Image: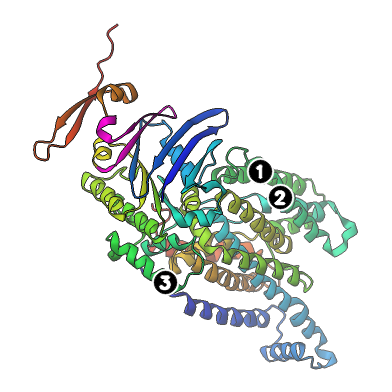
């Protein structure tokens, strides 16, 4: 399923957080959003998974406006991993995964159980089923939330910084889980090397606008990174794989 | 995590509730024997006859004790169900039905009747009507102040607004109590603030019963949405639940149930805070289970709390809120210290 964001603008009070963003995620593609803190990535993603309504523009799934859809119908095709994972209530892992079945109609208890079991199997959290969600490590939590998203049986997955607070092995693990799901995916990511390695396309967002887009290594050029992130980037080749990696340091402060 | 399966717990609680209702009718300060109690109950149900010299005892059982224990069960179930709902609505484990300022608002209306003789034209209904109307007025005020155009009803704004306005309502009540000339009136105002089922009549049972049952059924149907809401507004939105709308509906339903319950029994504390937690310790946090078990547990708890409030200082009566606190606090602390239950993950 194709995801189109068309001319979306978002206001909070009188402040415009997102200005006329257009982007496209082709069916089965993994597209990354990168940009500095406060650039509007999360705000844009909230519009996509319907936690926010855009002031202008539309979010379309195969040409259908998600904000015109019945909420549960939209949740049956589009799942999300929002950044918040705080919970005041100690649900078990199995209960958290089962929440993914909420938007579906005509369910049976047995059918739900099988779908949830399969989702937990795929993300390797079956052994955690009876554990409390709040007591899990960051990496385990993300796997559980991905299992919940898979239990939702969506066609499109939206992820807001899914690798935050994870160690490097778990970062790679989470992104390859998303990749292997085969779903159309749109993710906000902070680590540029990780984004470059896993995404088909990148959109760079700064001050609420798209400032560059394209295949990762065309986009992540030192000039752009200096302008958007305020860092100096040095592309180097990985000694074994030969893949381009970026090393960073702060831009020298202009002499007074 | 060990969890007790729900069906046996629910069946056990229903049986326990039935037994508790019987005990509640049988136990009392006036010394009506158990044999008589059963005979009167049977006579009342089957339309049988009683002897003329039994009439006083029959009236105690059928017109005083029975509506009282039934109302205790209804109020307990309502407070527990609303407690579960409010905690999910404001996503805060410390919330209870009274955190939204509704009971303090109702207290203003009730005390205006008790102390100032307001709404005297409504006769015996003055207290309930005034409490309910002022509960709704308090609710509208909290709603209007807490709501913002940009964010709707957010959990934190609801709690802060409810708490702040509750202090204001309590100040008004205190002024009325201190200003009242009659000592006995101040005592009944106090009774009402701590909660009491002493004024229970059959006339109150259908209204309270229907409201609590309807509220319970409404909540139980939305158990899964409450789970999603408890995880966060964004998660809820991504699962197809509209958090702002659900919270608005929850606000209305919990306010109606709280207002009704408070109108017939005053502000009985602790049931709405403690029962949801104890039930979550036993059956887990999933609202599909909690909303089955918590109202039953609340009903049983309040029936016994009311029995104790009648017996401990008989023939004088303690406010039932004192009993729920005296019995509830140690039980709650014990369960909490036993561990295995994460309070908000900390």
**Residues at circles 3 and 2 in contact by the CB criterion of under 8 Å:** no
Residue B105: which numbered mark, if any?
A: 2
Callout 1 touching callout 2 (CB < 8 Å): yes
Residue denoted by label 1 = B165
Answer above or below: position of B162 versus A14.
below
> Do callouts 3 and 1 mark residues in contact (Cβ within 8 Å)?
no
**Separation of marks 3 and 1 at Cα, in angstroms:** 48 Å
A209 relative to A119, above or below: above
- Crowding at mark 1 (Cα within 10 Å: few <14, some 14-19, many 20+): many
Report in which chain the residue with disc 1 lies. Answer: B
Nearer the observer, B140 or B288: B288
Left or right: B328, with B264 as reference point: left
Q: Position of residue A154 (x, y in %)?
A: 41, 56
Please say if B319 is above or below B65.
above
The residue lying toward the viewer, choosing from A114 and A22, is: A22
Secondary structure of residue under mark 2: helix
- Judging from the image, mark 2 belongs to the subunit labelled B
Q: Which residue is mark 3?
A: A111
Q: Secondary structure at mark 3?
A: helix
Locate residue A196 relative to residue A48 in the image: left or right.
Answer: left
Percent position (x, y) of residue B155? 55, 46
Residue A212 among those drawn in magenta = yes
Q: Is residue A91 at all visible to an observer of this figure?
A: no
Residue range in magenta is A198-219
Q: Residue at x 51, y 69 (%)?
A: A106
Dot 3 crowding, Cα within 10 Å, few <14, some 14–19, many 20+? few
Q: Are marks 3 and 1 on the same chain?
A: no
Depth check, front residue: B151 or B107: B151
**Disc number at residue B130?**
none
Quadrant in which the N terminus of chain B appears: bottom left
């Amino acid at each position: 399923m194709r995801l189109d964001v068309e001319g979306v603008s978002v206001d909070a009070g009188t402040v415009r957080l997102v200005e006329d963003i257009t982007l496209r995620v082709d069916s089965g593609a993994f597209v990354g959003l990168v940009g500095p803190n406060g650039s509007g990535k999360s705000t844009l993603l909230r519009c996509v998974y319907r936690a926010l309504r855009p002031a202008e523009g539309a979010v379309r799934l195969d040409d259908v406006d998600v904000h015109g859809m019945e909420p549960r119908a939209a949740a049956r095709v589009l799942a999300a991993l929002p950044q918040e994972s705080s919970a005041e209530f100690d649900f078990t892992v199995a209960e958290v995964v089962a929440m993914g079945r909420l938007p579906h109609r005509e369910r049976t208890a047995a059918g739900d159980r099988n779908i949830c079991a399969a989702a937990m199997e795929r993300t390797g959290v079956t052994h955690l089923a009876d554990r409390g969600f709040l007591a899990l490590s960051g990496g385990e939590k993300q796997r559980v939330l991905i299992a919940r998203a898979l239990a939702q049986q969506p066609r499109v997955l939206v992820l807001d910084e899914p690798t935050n607070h994870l160690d490097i092995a778990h970062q790679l693990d989470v992104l390859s889980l998303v990749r292997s799901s085969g779903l159309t995916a749109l993710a906000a990511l902070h680590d540029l090397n990780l984004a470059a390695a896993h995404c088909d396309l990148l959109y760079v967002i700064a001050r609420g606008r798209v400032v560059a887009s394209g295949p990762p290594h065309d986009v992540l050029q030192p000039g752009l990174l200096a302008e958007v992130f305020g860092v100096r980037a040095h592309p180097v080749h990985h000694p074994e794989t030969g893949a381009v990696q970026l090393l960073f340091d702060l831009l020298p402060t202009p002499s007074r | 995590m060990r969890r007790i399966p729900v069906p046996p717990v629910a069946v056990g609680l229903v049986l326990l509730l039935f037994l508790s209702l019987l005990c509640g009718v049988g136990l009392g300060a006036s010394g009506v024997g158990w044999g008589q109690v059963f005979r009167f109950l049977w006579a009342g149900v089957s339309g049988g006859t009683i002897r003329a010299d039994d009439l006083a005892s029959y009236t105690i059982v059928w017109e005083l004790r029975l509506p009282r224990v039934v109302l205790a069960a209804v109020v307990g179930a309502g407070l527990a169900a609303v407690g579960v709902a409010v905690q999910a609505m404001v996503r805060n484990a410390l919330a209870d039905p009274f955190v939204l300022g509704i009971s303090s608002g109702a207290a203003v209306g009730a005390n205006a009747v008790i102390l100032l003789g307001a709404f005297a034209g409504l006769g015996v209904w003055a207290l309930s009507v005034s409490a309910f109307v002022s509960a709704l007025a308090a609710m509208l005020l909290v709603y209007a102040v807490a709501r913002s155009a940009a964010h709707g009803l957010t959990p934190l704004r609801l709690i802060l607004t409810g708490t702040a306005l509750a202090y204001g309502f309590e100040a008004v009540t205190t002024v009325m109590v201190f200003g009242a000339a009659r000592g006995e009136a101040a005592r009944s105002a106090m009774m009402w603030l701590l909660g009491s089922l002493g004024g229970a009549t059959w006339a109150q049972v259908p209204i309270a019963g229907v409201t609590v049952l309807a509220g319970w059924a409404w909540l139980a149907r939305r158990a899964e949405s409450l789970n999603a809401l408890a995880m966060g507004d964004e998660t809820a939105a991504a699962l197809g639940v509209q958090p702002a709308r659900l919270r608005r509906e929850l606000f209305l339903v919990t306010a109606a149930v709280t207002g009704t319950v408070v109108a017939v029994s005053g502000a009985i504390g602790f049931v709405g805070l403690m029962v949801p937690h104890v039930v979550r310790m036993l059956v887990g946090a999933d609202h599909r289970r909690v909303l089955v078990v918590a109202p039953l547990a609340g009903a049983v708890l309040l029936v016994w709390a009311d029995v104790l409030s009648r017996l401990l200082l008989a023939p004088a009566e303690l406010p039932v809120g004192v009993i729920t606190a005296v019995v509830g606090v140690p039980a709650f602390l014990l369960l909490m210290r036993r561990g295995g239950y994460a309070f908000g993950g900390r």
